[in-house]
Image (spheres, grey):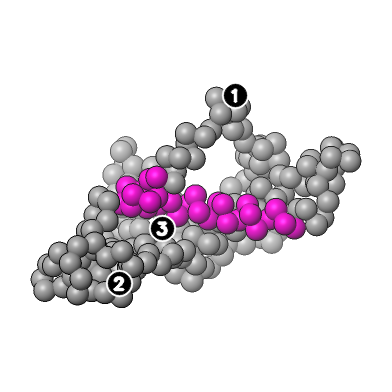
Amino acid sequence: MEQDGEPWIDLPSRVYPAGRTAVPGSSVGVLHCEHPGEEGPCKTAEMISPRLSDEMAARATLLAMCVRNAMEGTVHGGELGQASLTDEQLAALNPIVRNAIATGLHAESQYFKEMAARSYLDFQSALVPSYWARPELLDDYKELWDRVATEPKVPEVVCKRCGREVVNIGGAKQPRWSHLAADGGLTVGCRAASFTPSDGWEDIPKSWKAVPGHTPRTLDEGK
C-alpha cells in the first residue's frame, strides 16, 4: 500500500511508513523495510527497540534505589538469617529491578498511544494475584514526614523575582522551575502563584515567570 507516493507497512491498529519514525518526537522505535517496492505488508520489516529517555532512566534509577534500600536489613543482611540474599545475589538483582521499573515507566507513558505498551501492562495487570496485600508507605518515609512536620518551614530555593518558593519539576539537564502556589498547586507564573480565593492576585507583572534565585539561609545559619 502507498500513501503520498511512499510504501507503507500494515501493522495491527496502525499503519506506519516504511523506514520512518512511527510517531515524530515520541519514544517509539523505527520501522525498517528492505523491500519498500513490494506490495502488501513487508515480511522483513523490523521494529527497532523503543528509546528510553535520560530523564526516565534517571527516574527508574531513583525508584530502584528506593527498592534497594528497602531490602537492606530485611532480605539482605538482616532479618532472614540464612535466607537473606548474599552481596552477589543482590548485585545480580539490582539491574533487574532498575530495568523492570524503567520498562514499566516507559510502558505507562506510552499506554494510550502504543498497542505494545498497552499489551505489556495489561498482561502484567492480569498476573497480579488477588492475595497480594495493598501497598503501604515505608516506615522510614512516614517517620520523615512526622519529623519534618515538627520543624519550621524553610524554603530551599526561592524565585528571584517574586520571592516565592520554587521547585524544579524537570530534570537536571532540562530544569523546569515552578512556584509552590499559594493555593497549594504548582504554577509557573509569579502572579498566578500568588492567587488565593480570599485575596485575589498580588500586584505582580503578568510577564514574570519562575526563576530560581538564592537559596535561603537556614534558621541555624541566620543566628
Can residue 130 be seen in this snapshot? yes
In whole angstroms, how far apart are the C-alphas of marks 1 and 3?
41 Å
**Residue occupying the point 23% across, 58% down:** 10
- Check disc 1 and report the residue beneath it: 131
- What's under tag 3, amino acid-wise? Ser
Q: Which residue is mark 3?
A: 178
**Amino acid of disc 1:** Tyr
Image vertical order of residue 37 relative to residue 223, above or below? below
Depth-wise, is mark 1 or mark 3 nearer the camera? 1
Which image quarter holds the N terminus? bottom left
Q: Earlier in the sequence, mark 1 or mark 3?
A: 1
Residue at x 47% of width, y 36% of height: 125
Of the two numbered discs 1 and 2 on the same chain, state the one appearing first in sequence.
2
Q: Looking at the image, tell me whether mark 2 or mark 3 is earlier in sequence order.
A: 2
Q: Are marks 2 and 3 in contact (CB under 8 Å)?
A: no
**Residue 70 image point, x, y percent:** 71, 44
Q: Position of residue 103 (x, y in %)?
A: 50, 54
Label ID, residue 33: 2
**Residue 203 appears left or right of 86:** left
Q: Main secondary structure of the magenta part?
A: helix
* Residue at image point 33% right, 52% down: 114
Q: Amino acid at mark 2?
A: Cys
Q: Nearer the viewer, mark 2 or mark 3?
A: 2
Q: Nearer the viewer, mark 1 or mark 2?
A: 2
Q: Position of residue 3 (x, y in %)?
A: 12, 67
> Does residue 58 appear to the left or right of 182 in the view shown?
right
Which mark identifies residue 100? none
Q: Which element type, helix, strand or loop, lies under badge 1?
A: loop
Chain part drawn in magenta: 91-119
